[in-house]
Image (tube, helix red, strand yellow):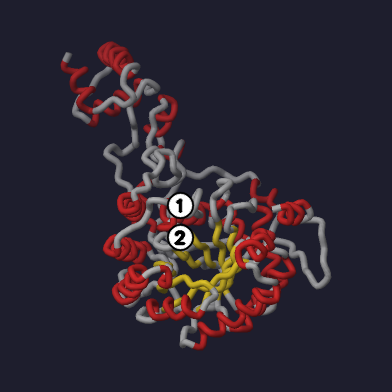
Amino acid sequence: MATSLVHISGFFSSTTRNTTTTTRPTTIHSYFKTTKIQPYKSFSVVCHQRPNYIPNHIEDPNRIRIFDTTLRDGEQAPGASMTPKQKLDIAHQLAKLGVDIIEVGFPASNKADLDTVKLIAREVGNVAVNDDGRIPVICGLARCHKNDIDKAWEAVKYAKFPRIHIFIATSEIHMKYKLKMSKDEVIEKARSMVAYARSLGCNDVQFSPEDAGRSDREFLYEVLGEAVKAGATTLCIPDTVGYNWPREFGQLIADIKANTSGAENVIISTHCHNDLGLATANTLEGAYSGARQLEVTVNGIGERAGNASLEEVVMTIKSKGELLGGLYTDINTKHIVMASKMVEEYSGLKVQPHKPIVGANAFAHESGIHQDGVLKNKSTYEIMSPEDIGLHRSNESGLTLGKLSGRHALKAKLFELGYNFEGNELNDLFWRFKSVAEMKKVITDDDLITLVSK
């Protein structure tokens, strides 16, 4: 930990031999330029034709691949284990969503995981479910051990587009205390195991230096370069313990692209954890700095505080793509709510009511001031349409009546129920409503009907 603090404190000022510190596309301050506020518009229409899949190349430099690891990293959250049938159902939903790569599991961990990965490779990894005919890549995780790689290949090889994801730790603290290996040993292990995976016939190999965010820069460039030489097609840069902050992580991605031999011939990916609540922000900074694959999970589930949230990352890119230099994904966002509810039910991990995008309160309004604005124009307090993520509200304006609600919202809700009150009648009913609302958190339709009948 002490070593990593030194790296951070000297992050912007230190220079080393043979290292290029890149200038990122723009300074962070230019993000906050004044822009004209526009009413929200529908974002859910996919307007880009998906090209043929090439592991180490994306034809359009603005296109982002979405790598979903809900079924692997997400399932590692305590209490989140799922049955093979549940994982298969989620994999089908992720395919509908338009996820580019689905990381299904860790085949060497146990026979059940191996069989589940194999099942999903066969049933999801060979069938196109969207109009563009694209089939998702099916990925299995492996440590830098031949047995792990053999098991991963045994499971994923049944998919049309199989991928093996190999990782080894590169931070000083991990190498010293967990691996008990020298830098040279780690480099050799990474190089030889990537080459071994390619020798099996797998032409799509992803390599991750675990805890890259706390790793020595020069060593990181070296091990990544050796992985590329050995045949890696994607380099994933993990902030394994959620320790980086956005400017720092974005610079890390930019510097890896500038200083890693062969980086121009592979895809750079992010994998950010949420220990400091920065996973989504770090992921977006990574994309802005040149990463073209983003690793996420539905509802942000995962180890400890979780991972970057698929719905947050995707909808930010949808909403702010122009500010991000024209970046876009091919996610069909109308399937987000269904994916979220399925993962919540199957994993047992409840979504917080105030969770962005998919939380129960994300498109609900109780404050009288907010309700009045939304009734006049939804874009006063909503920056996207709930229909864009597949959410269909019981009432068009998302009004939730409570003690903070005003006359305008009460009148609108009563009108939905078939009642039309004006003037003194509305005023009298409003004060009776407020008396009830002081004692109840939420006023239901039945409560309102009772009030009207008195």
Disc number placed over residue 300 in the picture, else none: 1
Disc number placed over residue 446 in the picture, else none: none
C-alpha span from label 1 to label 2: 10 Å
Question: Which element carries disc 1, helix, strand or loop?
Answer: helix
Classify the position of the C terminus by image quarter. top left
In the rendered image, the vertical position of residue 71 relative to residue 108, given as above or below:
above
Is 284 displayed left or right of 347 in the figure? right
Q: Nearer the viewer, residue 449 or 100?
A: 100
Q: Earlier in the sequence, mark 1 or mark 2?
A: 2
Which mark is nearer the camera, 1 or 2?
2
Residue 97 lies in what quarter of the image? bottom left
Disc number placed over residue 73 in the picture, else none: 2
Neighbourhood count class around disc 1 (C-alpha, 10 Å): few under 14, some 14–19, many 20 upward: many
Residue 73 lies in what quarter of the image? bottom left
Going 56% across and 80% down the picture, which residue do you hit?
A: 194
Going 25% across and 27% down the picture, which residue do you hit?
A: 444
Instruction: Decide if residue 334 is in sight here.
Output: no
Disc 1 residue type? Answer: Gly
Going 29% across and 16% down the picture, which residue do you hit?
A: 436
